[in-house]
Image (cartoon, rainbow, N blue to C red):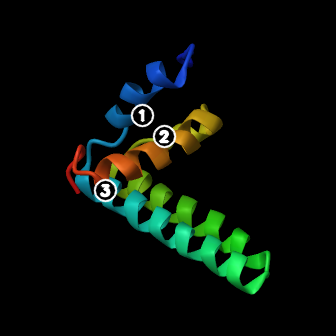
Amino acid sequence: MSERFASFREFYPFYLGEHRNRTCRRLHFVGTSFSIGFIVLALKSMQPWWLLASLVSGYAFAWVGHFFFEKNRPATFKHPLYSFIGDWVMYKDILIGRIPF
């Protein structure tokens, strides 16, 4: 049965539990870093195709981490919005050292 979450605050501990594997977290971080770079390229070049590259890189790295290292299904499949937000919050938490890289 699919879990229901009343808020992102309630969802985030679940999200972190789905990212216990360090390699999976690192792949998320790398994919999100590439996404940021592609967003910057899209803005500088005024070429919207870079936004597609941003989405593809972000999800591709994350899904490799889940399927091959974490060995679970990405939360995106059941909780797409909270999962998208969770990736950015986890990225910030890794940057500030709250979560080990």
In the rendered view, does 67 fall on the left or right side of 24? right
**Label 2 secondary element:** helix
**Residue annotated with mark 1:** 15
- For the point 23% across and 43% down, the residue is 98
**Marks 2 and 3, how far apart in space?**
14 Å
Q: Is residue 64 above or below residue 17?
A: below
**Residue annotated with mark 2:** 86
Kindly report which numbered mark, 3 or 1, lies closer to the viewer in this rendering. Answer: 3
Marked residue nearer the N-terminal end (3 or 1) = 1
Q: Whole-percent x and y of residue 71?
A: 36, 47
In the rendered view, does 101 fall on the left or right side of 49? left
Q: Amino acid at mark 2?
A: Gly
- For the point 79% across and 81% down, the residue is 46
Q: Amino acid at mark 1?
A: Tyr
**Residue annotated with mark 3:** 95
Q: Are marks 2 and 1 in contact (CB under 8 Å)?
A: yes
Sort mark 2 into few (<14), some (14-19) or many (20+) by Cα contacts within 10 Å. Answer: many
Q: Whole-percent x and y of residue 67?
A: 43, 53
- For the point 79% across and 75% down, the residue is 48
Q: Amino acid at mark 3?
A: Leu
